[in-house]
Structure formats: structure tokens, C-alpha cells
Image: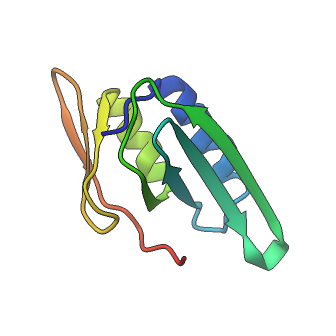
Amino acid sequence: MLNVNWQTFASSIERVGEFSNSQKLIKLDVKQNTVDVVGQDIDFAISAKETISLDKPSTPISIGFQAELLLQALRVGRGVIEYSEPSMAVVINNENKTVLVMPMQING
């Protein structure tokens, strides 16, 4: 479970997504108390990384997303982000809505 301020998280995804490839693919490296939002475009040799503190400790995982889809889901869901494996759908829950987002396969 990823418990983070959704506005801070969304802003970070927007900024980092600008440094990712043309499909706006980003990687989330979740650690126990932080999450790194990483974007890179190998063709143009640019990258960005932002680290956000988590409200509660989380289970480590590296998972990839298309930034725009994740942002849309965050804006609708605005809740706790639940995940289990890098290949399984991520669930964003609040008291009124449940949103599913499929991750993208990442290398390394």
C-alpha cells in the first residue's frame, strides 16, 4: 500500500514525465519510507528523478506506468494506492471510487 499525498505525487509525476520518452513512461521505485519517481529518455540522454516521503511505511516495489494514465487515475481516485506485484493492476481507493491502473513492463 502506498500512502502519499496525492497532490504532491501527481505534481511529481507531471514534472518527471516531461523528461521521459515520447510515451511518457515513468518508473516508481517504492522503498519503505519513500518513493522515487523516475523518467528517462535514452534517445535524448535526459532523465529526472524526484523522491517523495511516504505517510506510512510501504512494501518495496519497482513498477512502471504511462504517466498520463496514472495522473488521470489519481485525479479521479485521490485515495490510497494498493499494489501487489509489478505485473498486476494497481488499485486506487477512496470512500466513493475504485480505479484500476495497469502497469507497464520496465527493464531492470
Which residue is at a point 65% across and 68% down the rendered structure image? Answer: 22
* Residue 30 image point, x, y percent: 48, 48
The residue closer to the viewer here, 67 or 105, is 105
User: Is residue 25 positioned above or below 58 on the image?
Assistant: below
Which residue is at a point 42% across and 74% down the rendered structure image? Answer: 105
The residue closer to the viewer here, 67 or 2, is 2
Quarter of the image that includes the C terminus: bottom right
* Residue 60 image point, x, y percent: 41, 52
Task: Give the quadrant of residue 89.
Answer: bottom left
User: Is residue 8 positioned above or below 44 on the image?
Assistant: above
Left or right: residue 96 versus residue 89 is: left
User: Is residue 37 positioned above or below 1 on the image?
Assistant: below
* Residue 93 image point, x, y percent: 22, 32
| Type of colouring | rainbow
Quarter of the image that includes the N terminus: top left
Which residue is at a point 40% across and 33% down the rendered structure image? Answer: 57
Left or right: residue 78 versus residue 35 is: left
Outermost residue toward the right in this view: 45
Left or right: residue 4 versus residue 34 is: left
* Residue 9 image point, x, y percent: 53, 33
Q: How many marks?
A: 0
